Image (cartoon, grey):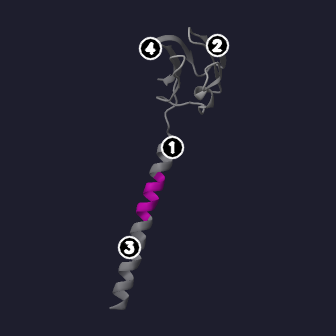
């Protein structure tokens, strides 16, 4: 009877390890296949003002009635490196590189987003 109890415990451990391995492999797959965007779209007050390909390295100054933002695209990564808004949340935002990610500057009504 003791062997049967031990066999159940070993099979439970094997099942747990298999389920854990499947979960880890799935997580790695999701993280590694993060869809990269092809274009950067810059909107001011809801109106698209510029579009760029992420394959080009650019430095672009956006001037609005509310202020100025400096957007840099380098190696497929987009970053707002400077702004004259008071809080500079857009400048402190992490750089973006995947479809659906955005950097927003509320005082300047600016939206920087990556699209397909």
Answer with mark 2 or mark 1, whichever residue precedes in sequence: 1
Marks 2 and 4, how far apart in space?
Answer: 18 Å
| Sooner in the amino-acid sequence: mark 4 or mark 1 | 1
Q: Position of residue 14 (x, y in %)?
A: 42, 70
Q: For this view, does 92 lie left or right of residue 19?
A: right
Residue closer to the observer: 73 or 82: 82
Q: What separation in Å lies between label 3 and label 4 (alpha carbons)?
A: 56 Å
Disc assigned to residue 12 = 3
Q: Are marks 3 and 1 in contact (CB under 8 Å)?
A: no
Q: Residue at x 50, y 30 (%)?
A: 101
Q: Which residues are magenta?
A: 18-25
Instruction: Find disc 4 in the rendering and name its residue.
Output: 46
The vertical placement of 114 against 64, above or below, is below
Where does label 2 land, which residue? Answer: 61
Q: Earlier in the sequence, mark 2 or mark 4?
A: 4
Kindly identify which numbered label has been placed on residue 31: 1
């Amino acid at each position: 009877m003791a062997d049967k109890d031990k066999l159940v415990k070993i099979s439970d451990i094997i099942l747990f390890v298999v389920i854990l391995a499947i979960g880890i492999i799935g997580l790695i797959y999701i993280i590694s296949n993060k869809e990269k965007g092809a274009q950067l779209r810059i909107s001011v007050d809801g109106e698209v003002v510029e579009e760029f390909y992420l394959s080009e390295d650019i430095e672009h100054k956006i001037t609005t009635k509310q202020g100025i933002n400096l957007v840099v695209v380098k190696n497929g990564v987009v970053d707002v490196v400077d702004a004259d808004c008071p809080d500079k949340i857009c400048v402190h935002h992490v750089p973006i590189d995947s479809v659906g990610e955005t950097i927003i500057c509320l005082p300047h009504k600016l939206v920087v987003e990556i699209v397909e």
